[in-house]
């Protein structure tokens, strides 16, 4: 088995086993979106109007939940030291961990989103665009988040600082992602939002591993 | 193969935590690092792994400390065993085997871990976890072993087995630097570290000396 595949398999296995936190993000996403109508009230047009933004904010926060353990757990038990001494480049290791984070956190959100969109009375026309937007945008959330996780890896209560670092960087993804779905709900074309969102994703996926690996190197020393 | 360590020292936060160490080691030789707690044994070992910023230089077979080629020549075990408690003993080691190459089953066998290969590592005793951490060493034949208190929590029998494995490694032309307080029954050359000087004038960080006032 190739080393990178072995690492990916292990990361996914760790996430889905007890205490791994793979279901945590999804459960949080479900609860937040199901609580919203209780707070906002039963006005269906209002719900349909806020649905794209609400789903995207919930997705951001759900993604954030499992990020602080991304490198922290490996740092605490010494795995990160040994990984740094392995034949794999640290950038490759980070990229695989990002991918595993998306598979266990982002992907379940994309799959659950259509059901939740229904409960928020989102127009049917908007739903494919919501899923498309989430599918394109959630990898960026994992990649940007991994950079924050790498910067805060050695810190006690780093999760709190991580949120402060990462949430502002999530803003462009949130704006363009939510815009895609709400424009489709109004019967408009996605316009420039879609290429912008794809651009943000590509940029963070390509630069993220290098930035995060550099931050990890500083923190390992 | 020859290891040359030339005045390797380390400074953390403006304070010296490791005074310059110089030593040479030929193929087949091992060094036992000695000295009281806090003298810098772990620091020296981590420094030689390239995991700490250092002053001075070190070369192994012509490869410089800090280069990727150096990293490919060393194997390290520290105080933490790099074990995931939700994975079984076998899964833990097979992952490292996929990364470093080598035969996981043979390594499990050598450290007497086969009978508990299917047990979650979280349920293992401290000594069993340590054996699992050490089993990583024999996966791929890396010439320089850097071992930080390898026999902590091992029982007498497994300390002896580990001594045998280390001696096999040295006989095959390997090198080892072992920080240890016990006698492994091997012909390891003792190297006593001197405590880093903590005189105030040695603190180079202006914030720690009060120069900023």
Image: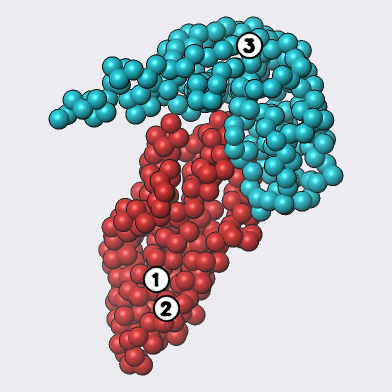
Chain colours: A red, B cyan
| Nearer to us in this view, A116 or B132 | B132
Which residue is rendered at x = 43% and y = 17% of the image? B196
Q: What chain is tagged by disc 2?
A: A
Crowd rating for badge 3 (residues with CA inside 10 Å; few <14, some 14–19, many 20+): some
Q: Secondary structure at mark 2?
A: helix
Parent chain of label 3: B
Q: Tell me the residue at 42%/22% (across/down).
A: B17
* Residue B145 image point, x, y percent: 64, 21
Labels in figure, total: 3
Q: Is residue B91 visible?
A: no
Q: Give the residue at mark 2.
A: A33
- Circle on res. A108: none
Establish if B152 lies above or below B4: below
Mark 1 sits on what residue?
A58
Query: Disc 1 versus disc 3: distance between alpha carbons?
Result: 60 Å
Estimate the spatial distance between the alpha carbons at disc 2 and disc 1, rounded to whole Å: 7 Å
Q: Residues within 10 Å of mark 1 (few under 14, many from 20)?
A: many
Q: Which residue is mark 3?
A: B190
Q: Give the image location of residue B80, x and y in percent.
A: 59, 38
SS for tag 1?
A: helix
Q: Are marks 2 and 1 in contact (CB under 8 Å)?
A: yes
Disc 2 crowd, CA 10 A, few/some/many (<14, 14-19, 20+): many
Q: Residue at x 55, y 61 (%)?
A: A21
Q: Would you place residue B179 above or below residue B29 in this image?
A: below
Labels 1, 3: one chain: no
């Amino acid at each position: 088995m190739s080393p990178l595949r072995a690492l990916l398999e292990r990361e996914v296995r760790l996430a889905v086993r007890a205490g791994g936190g793979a279901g945590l993000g999804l459960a949080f996403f479900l609860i937040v979106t199901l609580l919203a109508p209780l707070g906002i009230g039963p006005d269906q047009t209002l719900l349909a109007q806020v649905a794209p933004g609400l789903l995207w904010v919930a997705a951001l926060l759900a993604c954030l939940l499992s990020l602080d353990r991304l490198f922290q757990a490996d740092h605490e038990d010494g795995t990160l030291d040994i990984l740094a001494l392995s034949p794999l480049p640290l950038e490759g290791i980070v990229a695989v961990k990002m991918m595993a984070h998306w598979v266990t956190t982002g992907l379940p959100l994309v799959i659950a989103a259509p059901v939740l969109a229904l409960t928020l009375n989102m127009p049917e026309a908007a739903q494919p665009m919501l899923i498309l937007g989430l599918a394109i945008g959630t990898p960026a959330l994992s990649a940007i988040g991994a950079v924050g996780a790498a910067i805060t890896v050695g810190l006690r209560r780093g999760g709190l600082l991580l949120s402060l670092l990462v949430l502002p960087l999530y803003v462009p993804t949130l704006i363009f992602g939510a815009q895609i779905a709400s424009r489709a709900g109004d019967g408009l074309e996605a316009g420039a939002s879609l290429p912008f969102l794809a651009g943000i994703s590509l940029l963070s996926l390509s630069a993220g591993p290098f930035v995060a690996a550099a931050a990890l190197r500083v923190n390992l020393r | 193969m020859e290891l040359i360590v030339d005045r390797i020292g380390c400074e953390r936060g403006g304070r010296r935590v490791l005074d310059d160490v110089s030593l040479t080691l030929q193929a087949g030789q091992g060094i036992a690092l000695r000295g009281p707690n806090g003298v810098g044994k772990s620091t020296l070992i981590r420094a030689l792994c390239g995991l700490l910023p250092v002053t001075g230089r070190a070369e192994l077979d012509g490869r410089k400390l800090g280069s990727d080629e150096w990293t490919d020549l060393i194997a390290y075990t520290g105080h933490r065993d790099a074990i995931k408690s939700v994975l079984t003993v076998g899964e833990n080691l097979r992952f490292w085997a996929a990364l470093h190459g080598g035969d996981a089953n043979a390594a499990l066998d050598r450290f007497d871990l086969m009978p508990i290969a299917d047990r979650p590592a979280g349920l293992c005793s401290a000594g069993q976890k340590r054996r699992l951490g050490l089993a990583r060493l024999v996966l791929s034949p890396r010439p320089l072993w850097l071992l930080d208190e390898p026999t902590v929590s091992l029982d007498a029998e497994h300390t002896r087995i580990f001594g045998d494995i280390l001696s096999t490694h040295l006989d095959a032309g390997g090198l080892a630097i072992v920080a240890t307080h016990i006698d492994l029954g091997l012909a390891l050359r003792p190297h006593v570290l001197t405590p880093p000087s903590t005189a105030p004038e040695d603190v180079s960080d202006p914030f720690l000396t009060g120069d900023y006032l």
